[in-house]
Structure formats: structure tokens, C-alpha cells
Image: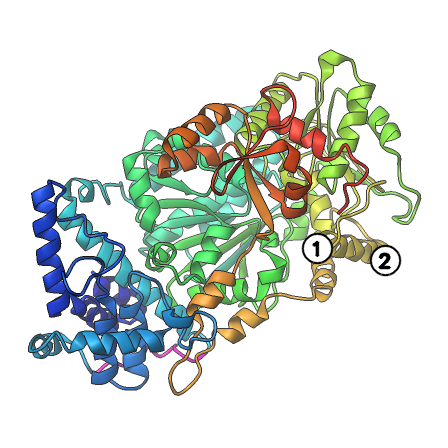
Amino acid sequence: MSAKWAALFDSEDWAWTAGWLHDLGKASTGFQRYLELSTDSRMESGRGASSLVDPDYDRTTGTGRVNHSAAGAAFADELMPGPVGMVLAYLCAGHHSGLADYHSSETGRACLIERLKEGRELLKGVGSGLDEIERELRLNLVPPDYLNEGNLHFWVRMLFSCLVDADRLDTEAFCSPEVSVRRGSFISLEELKQDLDSHLEKLALDAQAQDMDVNRTRRQILSWCREAALSSPGMFSLNVPTGGGKTLSGMAFALDHAVRYSKRRVIFVIPYTTIIEQTASVLRAISPRWESSLIEHHSSFDPKRSTPEFDLAAENWDVPVVLTTNVQFFESLFSARPAACRKLHNIVDSVVIMDEAQLIAPEKLTPCVSAMNELVRNYGVTMLLSTATQPPLPHLIEAKEIVPDPSSLHRALRRTAIKMPASLNEAPVSWPSLATEIAEHPQALCVVNSRRDAYELWKELRNALPPEEEPFHLSTLLCGEHRSVTVSEIKRRLSERGVTRVVSTQLIEAGVDLDFPVVFRAAAGLDSIAQAAGRCNREGRLGPNGGSVRIFVSPGRIPIGLLTKGYNSMVEIASLEGFDPADPKWYSRYFEQFYSRLNETGARFIQDLRAEAPELAVRFRSIGDSFRLIDEASRPVIVHYSQGSELMDQLERFGPNRNLLRKLQRCTVSLQSWLFEKEQRNIRELLDGFYCWNGPSGPQIDVDLFKESFSSEETVF
């Protein structure tokens, strides 16, 4: 199995040899004694032979956990000294515990040097079996032509993925055949393409009946995507304004291209879970076969949609269509952990749609772009960057733009009039006056730059409205379940032309399919303004420029960091003659300014992962553990929304398990560390490391958290 998958990136013999070596330590007398005694004792107790999980190994009795993975690593190092043996040593030694650092400076005895010492001791107990194993090995190993000291870490992870997944699947087939048979029972991409084609034909007929300009433009975009799908695999970009139908047109490109060039799957990489849920809903609506052929792999996945087949496919992405987050995708590509790396070989020879590409974490831009380039150059991936505000990503290999003239397309799809303030240096508007202005519109969205600002404006807007017209608010201080319910209710109100006023942070901007006649946006980066405008007159029902987008100078301070850099870049280009926030030609200038202001783009991760000669010393584990796209200075807190109270009770009574934790994720809010400490009086520790919001009043606890956290003048950013 390892060799079959590795053949896709010219590394078949390497994976074959690693597959033979990885469990060599199980031939040692110590491990055999361990099996005999453990099996006997468990058979006598009725627990079965599979319960080999004792925490410590007793060398006298032969019971407990035994290290077996280091023996194959040591044998590879002795048999093939130098770089070849070292690559195999990393793979074998880490197939249970993860890829190791070479040196001990950061990970101590977990490093490869120490593991090799253990392995040499284990080899002494293997005896004559070594000769038999050696005859099965492919010793004349030649690295693929594309390999160098800069991308060796990437290649080793891909080999590691092949080995780990094959090891887990082989074990599963032996120990749990009833589970194993559930894998891989999906329809082909060709069949999914047939369903998508039928769905698009139906949508086209419905759109013709409506006879709207925006629908005609969407059909043209789809035609361009299908034409581009005939092109050779590589890097592509789809620069289409919000509301241009990127999701289905991008999927049409992906499936046409995948079928033509025998790609194995389609992977949607999306920045926010709210967009994943929406995208999944659009794709599931294509047909029942689509419903059962895609998985969502992210932390906020609704467990009510889970099936045994879903859980299995999420382990290694062996499914036709995967929807996942930037965090899951990129952190896995730099991980050293077996569970995270296991799916990497299934990215090979796929089509990856990078949705809202402008939202790739700027602090990790360099390693993320490097990974994208590597996948396209050497692992058969076709990548599509899909965005309304295409950034010139530094050092990205040249991408073929699908749209012949993006500027003309943006003009054709312009549905809003964006009104900028006379000067971004003018006096800020007050929250009460802004609330009064919003209250004049029965349907309006206002997007602000921080959760504090959202609370202040929401409070003023409530005061300006009668009780029956309670405004909505959206922010990350609402748990995932509450956000989903709120967005669904907003969509329902809008579709019925009901009174709908929303105050939100920027989480609503990228990809959330809402359509307001009026949008207010606090001054921010140009990409944020363009995304907010995409929530206005989205379907073009008000005609060209019929939607109204008003940019205002906020009384709230812009949070320091990336938002401030984006704002300052916007101020600089807005002062230039001829500036038009709706013209895509300004996006490149904006992002150039923005990227020039970044202090850190993660270049050190690539530098620190370079293989050092002569030992091929690589810091796999320490770099993998530190590579995070989201600031970890936050604490999860369970709230009482929806099933939250019931799930908390189960957690206290029965302790954590995988299914319960997945359900709890939907009722969890992440608090920054300073806010977690500030709110200690309202937070209770249920179990060790599990916290719940225990603040005042009512079942809508996360709303109370939202109010309570920003009711104090001491709150700062």
C-alpha cells in the first residue's frame, strides 16, 4: 500500500522499504515475550489479545508497552549509512510517535539520535530474522529529481503519510474487518460530474426565466471555467466578484479538470467554518449522491450529520470531495503527528480549490505559499485560487487567470455604489448617530472591526428600536451552533422581506451568502470593504449600483496588528488620484502596501526545516508543534446554548469521549487569555481543563457573555 501511493510522486521504492522495516522490532525476543504473556493474561481475563496498552513494560515479566519502532530505524541506519538510511530512520522511528527532531535540544530523549540508540539495543534480540528482511528491501534507492535540502522535509512527510495510513489500514483490516469494509465505498468523480452538470442545466433554465444581467454573467463565468479546465494541470486563479457564482463554477472547473486528467479527488480549502457550512449546503443540494460523497473536516462540524463512513473518511480524506479549513490543511502539511500527516498522500494528484485566498494567514504566508508551490510542482496537484480580491501572493508560481478581463467582469457585476468618507482622517461618527441612521432602514447590515465595537453599536441600536425589532448581532463570542442558527434566521427574514438589522464583526464578510439593500462598513482594509460590499444587492435585484454601501470612520479603535496594517494601507491608497474601491486594479496596489507592512511572514519556518548535512538533521517535531495559523493564546469555554447544558452534565457524569467532545465543540466559545482571566467569576471548571460559562441570566449564556465582557470600561485591546 505504501509503495502504491508513493509511486504517485516517484518514490515507490522508498515507501516499499519503509513498509518492510517499520515493524522490524516486533521480531525481537522482548516483543515476542510481551505478546505471549500479554495475550495469555488477557485471554484468561476475557479481555482479548488486542488490549496491549499497559503503560510500562516490565522486562522481567514481559508485560507492558514495548518500543518496537526504533529497531527498523537503527537497521536502516546500519545497512544504508548516510542520507538514505536517515530518511528511512525518520519514517520507521516515527510511525507511532511522530516524526522526530534529529537533535535533542528541544525534544530531549524523543529525538532521533536517542531513538537510534534504543533501536540498536532492540536489534540485538532480532537475530537471524534480519537476513530474511534484508532480502526484501530495495536498497538502490534514488531520490526523485525534484528533491533538495529545502523541500526534503515536505517529501519525508509525504512518505510518512503513505507509511502511517497503510499501517493503520492494514491493522484495521485484520483487527476490525467489519470497520474496514466501510471504507472507500463512494461513487466516482465522473458520476459526481454528471449530477453537477444536470444541476447546472436546471439552474440555467431557472435563471433564463428570471432574465437578470447577473445570471447571464454567471453563465459566462461558468463557460470560462469549463474552458480553462481543459488546460494542463498547474496553478489557476478565478478572480470573480462576490456573488458571481464562484462555488459552483469553481467546482465545475475542478470536476471537468479532474475527469480529464485522472485526478483523485477535489479538496475545498476554506478560511471560516461558517463558509464551509454554507458551501457544503450548496454542494449537498446537487443530488443525494453528493450528500453521501463529501465530508466536512473542521472543528465545528455538526455531529448530527456524522456517520461511521464520515468518521472513517475524515481520518485519511479517502473520499471524492473534502471541505476543510485553512487551519486543518496547512497545519497538517507542516505537522509531525501521525494522525495529522495520515491524510497528506491523499492530497497528491487532486484538485485543490483555495477559497478566499486573500485570507491565508499573513504571519504564515511564506510557508503556506511554499507548500502550495510544492504541491503543484511535484505532487500532481492542480490548485485554483478563488477570490473576489485576488492578492499578488509573494513568491507564488505564476497562476493562469481564468477570467479574460477581470476589470471588465467587475464592472459588469457592479451592483453597489460605495460611498467613501471625504477623508479617512475626518472625525469619527458616534455610535448613537450611526444607530439612528441604521434604524431608518428596515434591512441593513453594519460591519465593524472588533467585538467591543459590535457590542457598543448593538446596544445603541437596541435603544433606537422598538422591542419587537430586536437587532441581530454576530461575532465569535457566539458559539458555532448559535452563529449557524442566527445566520439561518437572518436569511429567512431577508427572503421574506422582513425587518432585518444586523451588527457583525468581519466574520460575516467572506463568503456568507446574505443580500442586504444597505450595508455600513467601518473603514478597514480594501479587501474588507470589497467583501462587505459583496453582501449588498448580491443578486442584483436593485439593478446596477442599486445597493448602497457607506464607509464610515469608526469611533472604536482598530485592534492593533493585521487590522491596523490593513487600515493604514487603505488610507495610503485612498489618497491617490482616481481611487475606486470597486475596481480590482487597486487590489494589487493595496496588497503590495499591506504585505510591505508585515513584520513576520513565517519565513523562519522554511529556513528552520532545511535539512542540515551530513546527517539530514531536520526539526520535524518542534517546528510542527509551533506551526499554528491561529493564536493559541485563547481558552475554550462551553456555553449553555442549545444542548450545551445537557452536554455539560454528560461531561461531568461520564467524562470526555470523542463523540461528546465533537458535540461540545458546537457549544464552545474561545476566549482570549486576558478575557478568560478577567471573567473568572463567571467561569466554572467542570473537569480538569474543561470550563463552562456560568454567568448571570437565562439560557442564552453566550449572549450574556457578549454583553458582560464589554460592559466594563476596563476592557482593552
Give the x, y percent position of residue 165.
Answer: 27, 56
Residue 262 shows up from this direction: yes
User: Label 1 sits on what residue type?
Assistant: Leu
Relative placement, left or right, of 427 versus 168 is right
Does the image show residue 543? Answer: no
For the residues carrying marks 2 and 1, which lies nearer the camera in this image? 1
Element under label 1? helix
What residue appears at the point 45 percent right and 72 percent down from the top-left corner? 619
Which picture quadrant has residue 212?
top right
Q: Which residue is mark 1?
A: 562
Span highlighted in magenta in the image: 140-149
Instruction: Confirm whether the magenta stretch covers residue 255.
Output: no
Mark sitting earlier along the chain (2/1): 1
Dominant secondary structure, magenta: loop
Residue corresponding to mark 2 = 576
Which image quarter: residue 202? Answer: top left
Q: Which label was assigned to residue 647?
A: none
Left or right: residue 259 compared with residue 44: right
* Relative height, residue 647 to residue 17 (above, below): above
Q: Amino acid at mark 2?
A: Leu
Residue beneath the point at 29% across and 40% down:
191
Q: Position of residue 565 (x, y in %)?
A: 75, 57
29, above or below 561, in the image: below
Apparent side of residue 187 relative to residue 236 in the rendered image (left or right): left
Which residue occupies the extreme front position in the image? 60
- Judging depth in this view, the residue of 519 and 204 nearest the camera is 519
